[in-house]
Amino acid sequence: MSRTSSTPALSGDLLAWYRAHRRDLPWRRTTDPYRIWLSEVILQQTRVDQGLAYWERFVAKWPTVQDLAAASEAEVLKMWQGLGYYSRARNLLAGARQVVNEHGGRFPDTHAGLLKLKGVGDYTAAAIASICFGRPDAVLDGNVFRVLARVYGIETPIDSTEGRKRFRALAQQLIDPEQPGDHNQAMMELGATVCTPRNYTCLLCPLQPQCVAFATGAIDALPVKAGKVKVRERHFNYLHIRKGNGLYMRHRTGKDIWQGLWEPPMVETDGPVDAAGLRKALSSASIAGRWTITRHSGPVKHVLSHQVIQAVFWEVVPPDAWKAPAQWKAVTGARLRKLAVPRLVERWMEELP
């Protein structure tokens, strides 16, 4: 089903379209690797319309990589709150400190050097290397996979070893060595705004005359994926425990989701529970006693990439002579608002009286 297109013609048509139709985004007005890197990290799992505000807030608070490197993890997580995938924020801070401590505040200017920074993968390294340093390194993200699969009619699954090798070789073959940064951004822009997963606008596409998927009616069938990721459902029972004007909160540690964020004390169960089930779960969690359950809200469904959280917030009163575990902290209003919390918890806190 696949066919080849003229590389110079494809790149020329693509670049001409990009210069005429690209969105005016602030990170496209600079070649500062810090600001490009920041945009790439924020936009990895975030829409541009949402990520733009975060990028502007980060740049306003930490205008240089040195400023970011001097920040605390708590500050960065709070600024990141609502974007999800919090490991990106922790890696962002670690990467900034690497640039400052290991490279004198200057980003490595090669793909290989950039890959050594914490959290920087092949895609981000190629983007920075091409946009900031003119390196002919092709990017491959979901947008680029989709454009290439449709234009060339490639049915090899993009999540297979063979597929990754094939698409990488093709992307590298197509890149304009004289304008690698613009070429990469044009490919991503086309996938983000025209050659979208659904509601694509083929008649506006500069590559439509040579697109195999358009010619054969296979647009919806491409790109091909070999398998789907299994989604795990989890049940979180949050304990709303008041202490004076404050609430008990705990700091999430370990390797689970939301590492480094704060949340109310929580008991996870295998499935949904009623009040009796919650008391049994509390006993199993070694925080037993005659807990008074006054009311609850939820379940609230919160969808992550590979998990679905069903959360219930239980307003409870502890047993007499109860002593909070050492890792639970009573936090009052002013400090409560400064804590970095998951978006799920933030929405619940917004409804508190």
Image (spheres, helix red, strand yellow):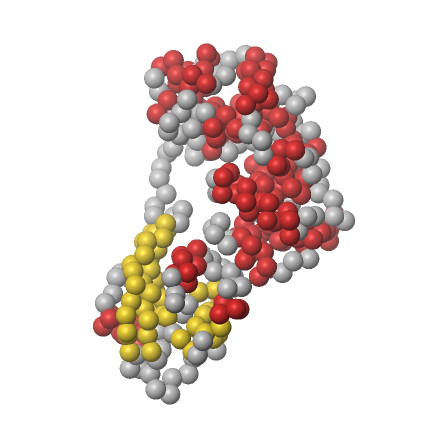
Residue 241: x %, y % from top left:
38, 74
- Residue at 63% x, 21% y: name it: 176
Q: In which quarter of the image is the N terminus?
A: top left
Return the residue nearer the eye: 94 or 349.
Answer: 349
- Residue at 45% x, 76% y: name it: 245
Residue 112, quarter of picture: top right
- Residue at 37% x, 34% y: name it: 226
**Can residue 11 be spotted in the picture?**
no
Residue 115, quarter of picture: top right
**How many numbered marks does the figure carry?**
0
- Residue at 50% x, 25% y: name it: 190
Residue 108, quarter of picture: top right
Q: In which quarter of the image is the C terminus?
A: bottom left
Residue 296: x %, y % from top left:
29, 67
Residue 113: x %, y % from top left:
68, 41
- Among all residues in the image, which is located at the extreme front? 353
Q: Is residue 158 left or right of residue 314?
A: right
Give above or below for 33 relative to 186.
below
- Among all residues in the image, which is located at the extreme bottom? 321
**Can residue 12 be spotted in the picture?**
yes
Give above or below for 94 relative to 39.
below
Give above or below for 39 relative to 327.
above
